[in-house]
């Protein structure tokens, strides 16, 4: 762990991150397929009582444990965003799937230090799978079968790669043309994974994930998981993802494949 980041407290922060996942999961399961009302936010994306309650529970735990830390949450906004350490929360990444009764949505939990993600959790509560990543450590998968280290797989070329993206509707304007160039070069493309795709990429099941129209709460937690499994995740220009990043994400299990995908996205 580099000096000046989480230091000796990284284990404490990781324990808290998993406590947050344990606290949010039963709330989410309680509301799953319950018929609860769904509201549309200003951007037309759905939100449910499960989103709000799960985030509120996590925020309460953080405030009690580390009151000096800031929090950015998708549903309840930013508090203490100027702090050195800021937690970034997405209680249900994939709310459309949650509403539709499909189980591979997830909870995203990240801790940033000076704007850079140093730990991340991808928790899939309905599938009892949780990926945990931290700077300088191998990424882990916790499941009913126990805990194991995960590694991305090698992939020599775009022609052999499996690409995933949540939806082609994420892309607009020049980004649509860029995505079309990339998906035309790969073996095949899958849609609909949300954060689950990044976990399966870290586990060596996918080769590329390319997305746009993302908020920081959508991608901060993904960075330590993907990188700790041997992959590379950046914006489309190859820049590190931070709290100041834009809305485009490119993740690859094989760092060489990342370069090839980035070149294809940039071609005109």
Image (cartoon, grey):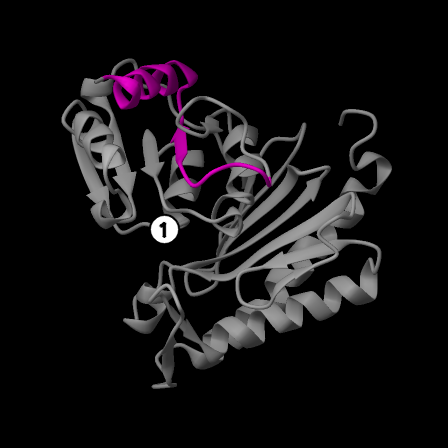
Which residue is disc 1 drawn over? 194
Write down the quadrant of residue 126 in the picture: bottom left
Q: Residue furthest left?
A: 184
Give above or below for 259 relative to 120: above
**Secondary-structure class at tag 1:** loop
* Image coords of residue 122 (percent x, y): 51, 50
Task: Indicate left or right for 19 with 101 as reference.
Answer: right
Point out residue 192 in the picture as x, y percentages from the top left corner: 27, 51
Q: Is residue 140 left or right of residue 259?
A: right
Tell me where residue 194 appears, x and y as whole percent: 36, 51
Region rendered in magenta: 243-267
> 106 left or right of 206?
right
Q: Position of residue 127 (x, y in %)?
A: 41, 60
> Is residue 256 placed above or below 71 in the rendered structure?
above
Residues 128 and 166: in front is 166
> Which residue is at 83% across, 60% downward?
67
Position of the C terminus by quadrant? top left
Circle 1 packing at 10 Å, graded few (<14), some (14-19), many (20+), is many
Residue 149 appears in the figure: no
Q: How many marks?
A: 1
**Which residue is at 71% across, 52% downward?**
81
Residue at the (52%, 36%) spot, across then down: 245
Q: Is residue 192 visible?
A: yes
Q: Residue 177's quadrant in the figure?
A: top left
């Amino acid at each position: 762990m580099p000096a000046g980041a989480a230091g000796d407290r990284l284990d404490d922060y990781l324990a808290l991150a998993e406590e947050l996942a344990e606290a949010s999961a039963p709330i989410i399961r309680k509301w799953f397929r319950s018929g609860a009302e769904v509201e549309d936010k200003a951007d037309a994306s759905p939100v449910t009582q499960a989103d709000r309650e799960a985030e509120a529970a996590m925020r309460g735990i953080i405030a009690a444990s580390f009151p000096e830390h800031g929090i950015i949450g998708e549903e309840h906004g930013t508090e203490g965003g100027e702090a050195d350490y800021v937690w970034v929360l997405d209680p249900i990444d994939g709310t459309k799937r949650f509403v539709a009764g499909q189980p591979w949505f997830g909870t995203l939990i990240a801790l940033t230090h000076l704007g850079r993600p140093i730990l991340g959790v991808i928790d899939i509560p309905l599938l009892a799978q949780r990926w945990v990543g931290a700077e300088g450590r191998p990424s882990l998968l916790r499941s009913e079968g126990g805990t194991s280290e995960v590694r991305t797989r090698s992939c020599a070329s775009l022609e052999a790669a499996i690409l995933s993206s949540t939806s082609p509707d994420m892309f607009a304007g020049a980004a649509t043309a860029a995505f079309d160039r990339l998906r035309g070069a790969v073996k095949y493309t899958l849609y609909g994974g949300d954060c689950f795709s990044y976990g399966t990429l870290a586990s060596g099941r996918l080769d590329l994930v390319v997305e746009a129209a993302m908020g920081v709460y959508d991608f901060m937690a993904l960075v330590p998981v993907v990188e700790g499994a041997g992959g590379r995740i950046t914006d489309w220009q190859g820049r590190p993802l931070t709290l100041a990043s834009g809305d485009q994400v490119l993740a690859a299990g094989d760092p060489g494949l990342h370069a090839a995908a980035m070149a294809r996205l940039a071609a005109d």
